[in-house]
Image (cartoon, grey):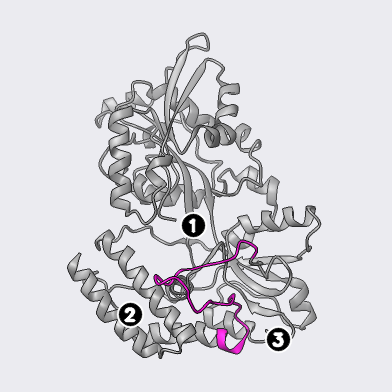
Amino acid sequence: MKKMPLLLLVVILLLAGCQQDKSAQLTVASNKDKVKLRVLHINQTMFNEMYGKEIMKAYPNYEIEVIPMESVFSQPDRSMKEIYEDVSNLIKQEKPDLIIFPFEDVYQKLAAKGELVDLGSYVKTGALQTENLHAPAIEKLTALNKASLNGIPARFDSKGLYYNKQLFDTYNLEYPTEQMSWEEVFALANRFKGKEEGIYGYNPPLYGFLDLFDIIRTVGYGRGLSVLDASETKVALNTDEWKSTTNLVLNGYKEGYLYLPEIPKDADSNGIVSLDPNTPNLFTEGKSAMTVDGIGLSEIMKLQHRNGGAAVEWGVVPEPGNGQSNMMLSDIFTIHVDSSLINESLEVLKYITSDKLSFNMDPEMVVSGISTNTKWIEKTYGEEFNGFFQNKNIAPHRVSSAPEGFWLKFHRLASKEMLSVFTGGKPVNDALEQLQREGQAVLEQE
């Protein structure tokens, strides 16, 4: 998602040397002293339900004022540059102590500009504990700003390849395994009957819309491909690798083992197809053998079963591709360097990393991921989620140097071209050639 809220934990960034070491010594207001923290978050209700109530129970002398950021993210098709500028202006106006980032991009930009407290010294002195947090999440956040830890990720999500054990047993097929390529996944999907019996080998995640290019890009990225060349000055789609990737998805659709909902002839001119809210998820209904989705899908299936829906016996292995885990971090707690309540803000971070808060998290509240607390993960999921965590190599989060306006316009072009391929019979080679040409023109204009 490109539109998400930001929160800054306000902390004074002291200079290197003795001052940095001194800053790691916490002296907090006593429980008798009233403390008022200003927190930048999406909205008051969401913050209270997810964190606020628990924090104020733990610190009854704390008063928390939430500064909402909903207006920043309510407009469609906004670039990350626009979101970043609005959040920066909001910080200047409101002067928050804590900032909670809903995703990584704006966090990365503000951290690089030195606006967020470096928490590394507090971790080194033991004033702030991170040992009980999912290590790859901390590693990824640290890598986002030149090995400097400027926040605590409270939640994360990771994708895996879900499979329906009952269908695999019925068809007498071996379960999917680790380190499968997308070619192997589609070959396995082809072993199922598809439209003949209403059983499909694979269905992509569909949440309210169908974006054909997004499906193709997911497979392409898993095969190590990129939309732009290494210099990010040329569009690199008219290649044999992208042609074979597009044909891999297209053939699965034509041959009936890849499920896609019916695409109306009058689909959106931008190539994004809005779906009926009642469009079924074939995997959760037991009619698809495999899908790639986030951890939240498991909670959807559990809730569905409790409400009388289908009971799917499922397993999960790492997502197909190049062996990297595309982990997504959310609810990143940070402190702004200009805060006058750094130590008090650090107390909130200490509570966020503790077992006390984590064990009060509702597993069904997975809209922004699950807790990074390892004890909570083990208690809530046990070993059934190992498939999400087996990839040791975390895909580096890299902010593209290409203009952000390019990505918005290019995605519309790409989605429209793929729609013409899947519904209009346009040859793949022609579509990619046109997309390369028009995409390059957009890149040069931006």
Does the magenta stretch mainly form a helix, a strand or a loop? Answer: loop
* Point 45% across, 69% down: residue: 272
Within the magenta stretch, is there residue 269? yes
Task: Give the residue pinned by disc 2.
Answer: 237
Task: Give the residue pinned by disc 3.
Answer: 193
Expressed as whole percent of the image width and height from the top left, the position of residue 192 reads: 69, 84
The amino acid sitting under disc 2 is: Leu
Q: Is residue 6 above or below residue 93?
A: below
Cα distance in 3D space between marks 3 and 2: 32 Å
Expressed as whole percent of the image width and height from the top left, the position of residue 337 reads: 31, 30
| Picture quadrant where residue 76 is located | bottom left
Cα distance in 3D space between marks 1 and 3: 33 Å
Q: Nearer the viewer, residue 369 or 111?
A: 369
Q: Residues within 10 Å of mark 1 (few under 14, many from 20)?
A: many
Task: Give the residue pinned by disc 1.
Answer: 327
Q: Residues within 10 Å of mark 2 (few under 14, many from 20)?
A: many
Q: Earlier in the sequence, mark 2 or mark 1?
A: 2
Within the magenta stretch, is there residue 409? no
Q: Nearer the viewer, residue 377 or 330?
A: 330
Q: Secondary structure at mark 1?
A: loop
Q: Is residue 78 above or below residue 311?
A: above
Left or right, 343 with reference to 358: left
Q: Which residues are magenta?
A: 253-278
The amino acid sitting under disc 3 is: Lys
